[in-house]
Amino acid sequence: MLIVITGPSGCGKSTLANLMLTELENVEFSVSYTTRKKRDAEIEGKDYFFVSKETFERMIQKEELAEWAVVHGCYYGTPKNTLERDSVDRDLLLDIDVQGAEQIREKHEGAVFVFILPPVFPELRERLEKRGQDSLPIIQKRLDTAREEIQRYREFDYVVINDELSKAAEELKSVILGQRCRREIREKEILPIMRSFAEGD
Ligand code: ADP
Ligand code: 5GP
């Protein structure tokens, strides 16, 4: 199953994604390609694949990306080969923006879309400032984009409000676990149960 999480920069998507990876089994994070500069705390290949503009544009030309967008002035995209690993036994978690979510929605039936909201606007600013990874002009650009992005929350199946982190993590976990109980997702597990009934004692 594809689980797409989207929300303004600083709302806590990476934090929540990391918690899902440690607290749930069979979840893989989809590592995106980006032309943004690597932050000190980030690890190449774990947080992103950091590439040049030329490399990214070559990937677009070769149609190697399942979706891509320009976000805050940089390219970001999801490689197609990652999405091929999506299966009923393993969930893929995508942290992508509203434009990317729109592209995935068009192509991948059954994907689940979750919008993450901060509790209030000033808290978003505070989180971006406290994260200490972006310059003030970049923070301002991200806050300006946030005002536009949040208008699109209605396009999403679920909304998680990341006020208290543990509560938001529980909510996101509940969404993922709930989706895993969907009948069509469970068919593979149901089949042997049904067969055992047919076989009798
Ligand atoms: P995003 O991936 O959406 O840009 P991050 O996960 O990097 O956001 O979170 C932005 C900052 O806010 C980080 O410093 C993170 O530790 C902090 N943060 C995340 N969730 C919460 C929360 N519920 N309460 C307070 N701070 C939070
Ligand atoms: P950041 O620079 O803070 O890591 O991410 C900035 C924005 O880019 C966030 O909204 C994040 O969800 C989005 N993003 C990250 N990876 C991708 C991707 O592969 N595709 C798209 N469309 N957006 C992405």
Image (tube, helix red, strand yellow):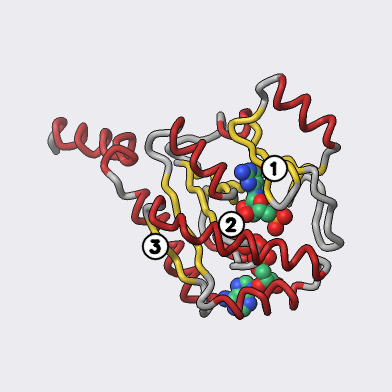
Residue 63 makes an appearance in the image: yes
- Dot 2 lies on which element? helix
Q: Which residue is mark 1?
A: 76
Q: Which residue is mark 3?
A: 174
Quadrant of the frame with the C terminus? top left
**First in sequence: mark 1 or mark 3?**
1
Gap between marks 2 and 1 measured at Cα: 22 Å
Gap between marks 3 and 2 measured at Cα: 14 Å
Say if mark 2 contacts mark 1, CB within 8 Å: no
Instruction: Name the residue: 39% across, 34% down.
Output: 109
Spot occupied by residue 31 in the image (x, y as percentages of width and height): 68, 44
Nearer to us in this view, 111 or 177: 111
**First in sequence: mark 3 or mark 2?**
2
- Dot 3 lies on which element? helix
As drawn, 43 above or below 120: above
Instruction: Name the residue: 46% across, 75% down.
Output: 167
As drawn, 96 above or below 117: above
Gap between marks 1 and 3 measured at Cα: 28 Å
Figure quadrant of residue 174: bottom left
Looking at the image, residue 53 sits to the left or right of residue 172; the answer is: right
Identify which amino acid the numbered label 2 is placed on. Leu
**Label 2: how many residues lie within 10 Å, few (<14), some (14-19) or many (20+)?**
some
- Dot 1 lies on which element? strand
Respond yes or no on whether mark 1 lies under 8 Å from ligand 2: yes
Instruction: Name the residue: 15% across, 37% down.
Output: 197
Q: Nearer the viewer, mark 2 or mark 1?
A: 1
Spot occupied by residue 60 in the image (x, y as percentages of width and height): 70, 26
**Label 1: how many residues lie within 10 Å, few (<14), some (14-19) or many (20+)?**
many
Respond yes or no on whether mark 3 lies under 8 Å from ligand 1: no
Q: Which residue is mark 2?
A: 21
